[in-house]
Image: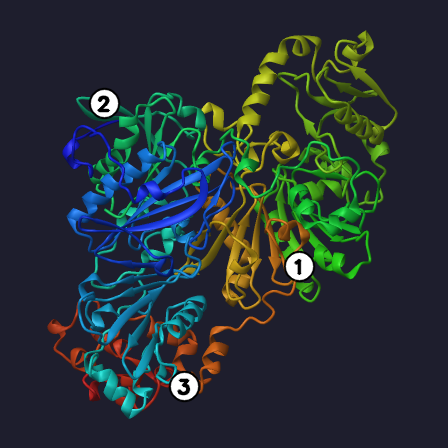
Amino acid sequence: MELTLSPKETEVRPDTIPDLKVDATFRKVPKHAISFALWKIDEDRLEAVARSQYGTFYDNCAYIIYAANLVGHYANHETITREQKANVPLERYIHYWLGNNVTEQNRSNVVHKIQELDSYLGNVASIYRESQNNESARFLSYFKNGYDVRSGALVNQPEQTSLFQLYGRKWLRAVELANIDWTHFNSDYIMVLLMDTITFVWIGRASASIERRSALAWVQRQRKDDAATLCIVDDGYEQSMSAEQKQLWNTVLPLQQRIVYQTTKSGSDCNYDCNSNNNNNKTNGNSSNNSDNSNSSNGSNKFRIYKCNQRGRLHLDQLDVGMPGKDDLSDAHGVYLLDNYGQSIWLWVGAQATQADALTAMGNGRAFVKKKKYPNSTLVVRVLEGHEPVEFKRLFGNWLTIWQDNTRGHKPVSTKFGKLDAVLLCERPKMAADTQLVDDGRGERIIYRICGDQFDQLPDTKVVVFTTNASYVVKYTIQCATVVPADLASVGIKSIIYQWNGSEASAETIAKADSYAMASFEKLNGVPSMFVQLYEFDETPHFLQLFEGKLIIMRGQRSELLHSNNNMSWDFKTNIMLETFLLKVYGDASYNGKAVEEHRLSSISSKDCYAIKTNHVWVWCGQSSTGDAREMAKAVGGLLGESSLVLEGKESKEFWQSVAMYFNQTLVINGQSSASSTTSSSSSSGAGSMCNGSSNGGGNISPTLSNNCYLNTTVPLKPRPPVQLFLVWWQQSQLRCEEILGFEQQDLCADCTYILDTGTLAYVWLGSRALSQERERYISIAQCYVQNSPFGRRSATALAVVRQYAEPNVFKGFFETWDNEWGKNFLGYDQLRQKLGSVAPSNCLKQDSALLLNNSQKDFDGHKKYPLPVLVQEMDMLPPEINPLRREVHLTHDDFVAVFKMSFYEFDELPKWKKQELKKLYKLF
């Protein structure tokens, strides 16, 4: 596919790059320092914004932000400038932000100004084009308390009553509106009406608890006169205000003209988006919804890559790749465009590309947006080879850069970190997180096997054998190696429920295991505990540590022999003695080792170790295998019986005759190159891509098709991707999420649910006051996230569930600091509202309030509300969304009670004939 972009479509209008003269204001920026700076462009003026005004923007202006920080750290509006040594690497970011009402002059000026700043800094910064209401996660991370957008139209107006629209879960956006009108109201929003003597806070019924709390805090900061009255008004309950308050309200927003748009409906059933702009789908009912973004979901983890070629006019040649990888960006002299399905457009500029290519890349990205008819607010980012931000790298499943360079001390699991010290794991959560080891695995374990209708508890034996056609539930009790209270608190949990699903397990088997495992987890509600769901090739280090690296996984056809009904107190050596099989031994330590039954081999690598059971037990180790790997293989061989160690190149004739059915000498001699390339390909795959997937252009592979693909056993060879934190919530049967860059413990709120994605394990963190829907559907949340994650991951990534105040050390260690007492004084929205009771009217919701949303009430509140005069019109005069037979559901609660002398809940309980009579009486039928 080829696209041709006309130069006139670009935001940078000149065809040639002039000799850039750097503005004197930019020359004050230290080139090699940690810093944060903000400038405003208003007409021809470039003004440095005072630090006290950081986080306040005007919608008719353009702004430039420059942020520089140490690699793996994050700058924000509180960052203090600190010079660094020349050899200290820094990450540099330039953002330019455009308000909704920015003038063409300001839009053009800001583009030239960022070229000046980029040139001054040496063309090493990533450049983000931000637009109001569609900012990147990195931009939002600069302002922890959110930001305000003031109306440029009101700048020179005398102080008067003003109306603000507030929304946003993690980052509250407070937008000042140019006029005061009911058309700005939406049930998603919180509206604030600021008057001289009173402040009205109108709470939309569909707004979230965290938004309401943030809005009350924002109002407290805005109030100039503490003596001014604060009135909290609930959506649909405006009539509950006192007569004096209603009189003030009616002077600017007459209640007889009330019209409130309802929650915006979204397209697909799982419109999942990992970018920060999900939260911005709140639109007024009278505005067009940018549906172009809806094609970005649909569970697709792929995006499109184009090579930019200049042939008079710019041409884009789409690369024919299945699962895009870093190797597709092969031309260091070129420029590539990555289309993340309209969510974001990325321009990658090679290290050897000309300065002109680097400077014009953003304009080319904007031209692409227009050519594809994407929303004008689509995020466009230019990145440079060698300076790619983490948001770009994680789009590729096989990015080869060492990930820990981009994290705050989160190193991958060490290949060898000496003797496993259980006390240190208790004392140091960061070590526990880095190794993903809660303890040394010596606690009590109880194993249950589920296969079809069979449900059995396995005997406690030295040898543990799983079969691929079954699921297993392991109840594990933590064994702390310390009695120090602080260390016990650091460990955080006392029990773990593990669920392991084999690759050949039926849906019925997995469903039964799900049910039993989650029921076991719920029974531990009073005990600090964690639930972990694993698949056959996704075992975590701690799970393997439970078996000291000697877990044996055999094919499902062995199930009848190993687990017949009359054979539960079986002896492994006796029952398996007549069988022949081949086990490939993975890992070189107790926390990453296991043995997996393989079919006849097609190639052998000198790095591999095998245990082969024929008429004798052989342990074969390749020449390039490590001493630790050989020790693990010998330990597995010892479980099968008396074994003989055979090294590559020193095999006896007896050995070759005995193992001929599995592999032969030809495979050892000729298989090294092919096996090595396979290993190399596997190693280059990022965490979450299939062993045999990314390098050959194939897509994600079903767990049932990848029997011999075991990722986490090679964790020491694979660097871990950077850890990510997402705020997640359900919205109209869709999972929404908002990424939090530069996260810390204080970002976890008790009334929310989060996902901490470590690359090998996705933790679902359940706040103690999260919605019951989220607390009960935690597995659905995790599975929906993993299956739709656009970061080149597989759908079988391991999942874990932790509850607030019962976080394990392997979770806490991913945060820079952790305070076990933090959050215990949390005040929810209702508590904050009661705290303001001295200034707010007593219109708090009663137990029989319609806003408590019983099933029938949900139907009532989910409809757009209209004034009574609109609803009693003739049928052909009604708004198109009104069903003439159900006009009553479009009344507000106040109007409904005034008309029918009862609540909708009471009305809904009436017989059908009675309801029709009443509707006819009041001309609502």
Is residue 925 at all visible to an observer of this figure?
A: no
Q: CA distance from mark 2 to mark 1?
A: 60 Å
Circle 3 — which element?
loop
If the image is split into quadrants, where does the N terminus sit?
top left
In the image as oriented, which residue stretches furthest toward the right?
642
| Most foreground residue, 754 or 51 | 51
Against 168, is 355 above or below? above
| Of 832 and 447, the residue lying toward us | 832
**Real-space CA distance between mark 2 and mark 3, rounded to the nearest whole angstrom:** 65 Å
- Residue tagged 3: 839
Q: Position of residue 236 (x, y in %)?
A: 31, 79
Q: Which residue is mark 1?
A: 521
Residue position for label 2: 310
Q: Is residue 81 visible?
A: yes
Q: Is residue 85 left or right of residue 228?
A: right
Q: Based on the displayed image, in which of its 4 quarters is residue 527 positioned? A: bottom right
